[in-house]
Amino acid sequence: MAAPKILRKKGSTKDFDFTFPDSGVTVKLKKVNPYITAEARAQLSRSRPKPPTRIITEDGPLKGKEETMEHDPDYIELLRKWEADVDERIMQLQIRRGVVSIEVDDWQDEVAQLRADMAEIGAAETLPEDDTVVYICYIASSTANDLQDFVAAVAMRSNPTQEAVDSAKESF
């Protein structure tokens, strides 16, 4: 399912081109307000699983007291999966909010082919519903570094560094 296109006045946001370093795919982005992702993360943190507890049965001064089992291996695995899910949801939010356009002809065909390939091996349900998210995460990002650079571009883009300014000066 493709994300709906939002119509906005031309020039209402500052768009910029981002090219994935390893795949070479170019997309047009806008910066995502960090308060949006912070608020989303704060709301999602409310669903953080609680660690298991047990009543201490061994003799001693703590017998009968409740103990929180934060180091329980099953809880640690549950927490790891929960954190990965939160990170994935935040990533999808950043993609939906930050990607203005994909500068590749027929990118939807590439997504459809990936969906067909995944269905053929019984893994279609692992892909997100949003076609833009699928394209960015599974096609445009050909390496983990590509995806990290994308997140940095959307979430942390700011003024150029002094090094970039000096480099630009040297090229004139």
Image (spheres, rainbow, N blue to C red):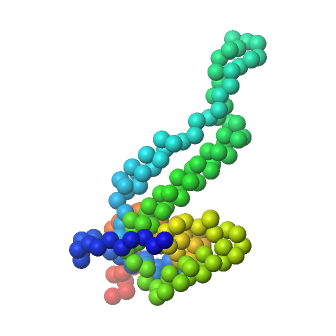
Residue at 58% x, 54% y is 84
Residue at 53% x, 71% y is 134
Is 33 on the left or on the right of 113, as rendered?
left
24, 103: nearer the viewer = 103
21, 124: nearer the viewer = 124
Could you tell me if residue 160 is visible in this image?
A: no
How many numbered discs, if any? 0
Could you tell me if residue 51 is visible in this image?
A: yes
Residue at 39% x, 71% y is 4
Query: Where 47 falls versus 16 (above or below)?
Result: above
Query: Where 165 falls versus 34 (above or below)?
Result: below
93, 170: nearer the viewer = 93
Question: From the image, which quarter does the C terminus lie in?
Answer: bottom left
Residue at 45% x, 50% y is 41
Q: Position of residue 81 (x, y in %)?
A: 62, 50
Q: Position of residue 146 (x, y in %)?
A: 54, 72
Q: Residue 49 sits in which quadrant?
A: top right
Q: Residue 37 sits in which quadrant?
A: bottom left
Query: Where 38 falls versus 2 (above or below)?
Result: above
Is 61 on the left or on the right of 115, as rendered?
right
Q: Position of residue 43 (x, y in %)?
A: 43, 46
Q: Position of residue 10 (x, y in %)?
A: 24, 77
